Image (spheres, grey):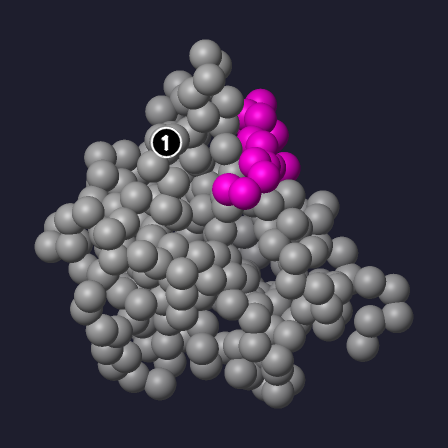
Amino acid sequence: MKNIRISSKDGLVLSKDGGATSTDTPGTDTPRTDTPRTDTLGIEWRISENQIDYPDALSFMESRANEVFSGDAPQTIWLLEHPPLYTAGTSASSEDLVDPDRFPVYDAGRGGQYTYHGPGQRVAYAMLDLSLYNKDVRKYVFNLEEWIIRTLSKFNVKGERREGRVGIWIDRGNGREDKIAAIGVRVRKWVSFHGIAINLDPDLSHFDGIVPCGIQEHGVTSLVDLGLCVSMEDLDVAMKEAFYEVFVPEEGAP
């Protein structure tokens, strides 16, 4: 397994798109830009148009999570795509890495097993202060699942939880179930990082190099594989709307 190499403190340089506009209102469109925008609840939304190398993303998450804890930066949702790669969670088993030479492999430090990331998959990294919502990691994972389920429902797709299986699943009929979204989290000092990944239109053959999340008996799917014509921008809008339906700060939270 290849080791992560972190190249700088913050790990990336965000380009500016001077033509972007923003309403900064919860539930409205997020501008297609790498310029961060903060909404009225104090959550900063970032959308990266270019593919982000995994070590750079990990470095930024580590730094931002520390800054959220210290109060030096706002909570952050970062929407992005990665180049093709595999990540290994803390429970990853070496035999589930079927083709270790196919793409770069990184230790993620999150929970879970092996996951594929690549073009056509929307990754959402969530650096949230869980003391504002609920200091309960299981509840947080449940809310991430709900965020995905509600996002998919906006395209009339029924995503479902499955006992003992991480992620969100699609019932294809005749006993076939395919995974459409992955979840992997880490929480430190009650600040989350890592997050979710929804398959819009990735190359599904790229999943063949691993046993996704250690589950051999089921496949993977995507919105396009299900026959939907959805753009990444459409997905981003749905994700932002669904986020505010699920993540509501608790009354009396600091």
Q: Quadrant of residue 252?
A: bottom right
x and y percentages locating residue 58 in the rendered image: 37, 71
Q: Taking the image as drawn, is residue 246 in sight?
A: yes
Q: Is residue 163 above or below residue 106?
A: above
Q: Residue at x 57, y 56 (%)?
A: 22
Q: Quadrant of residue 150?
A: top right
Q: Give left or right: position of 150 versus 55.
A: right
Name of the residue lying farthest toward the left: 101
Kindly identify which residue carries mark 1.
Answer: 217
Q: 7 or 140: nearer the eye?
A: 140
| Residue closest to the eye, 131 or 138 | 138
Magenta highlight on residue 163: yes
Residue 137, image x, y percentages: 65, 63
* Disc 1 crowd, CA 10 A, few/some/many (<14, 14-19, 20+): few
Q: Position of residue 165 (x, y in %)?
A: 51, 42
Q: Which residues are magenta?
A: 149-165
> With respect to residue 226, does 127 lie above or below?
below
Amino acid carrying mark 1 in the image: Glu
In-image side of 28 versus 236 (left or right): right
Q: Which type of secondary structure does the marked residue at label 1 adopt?
A: loop
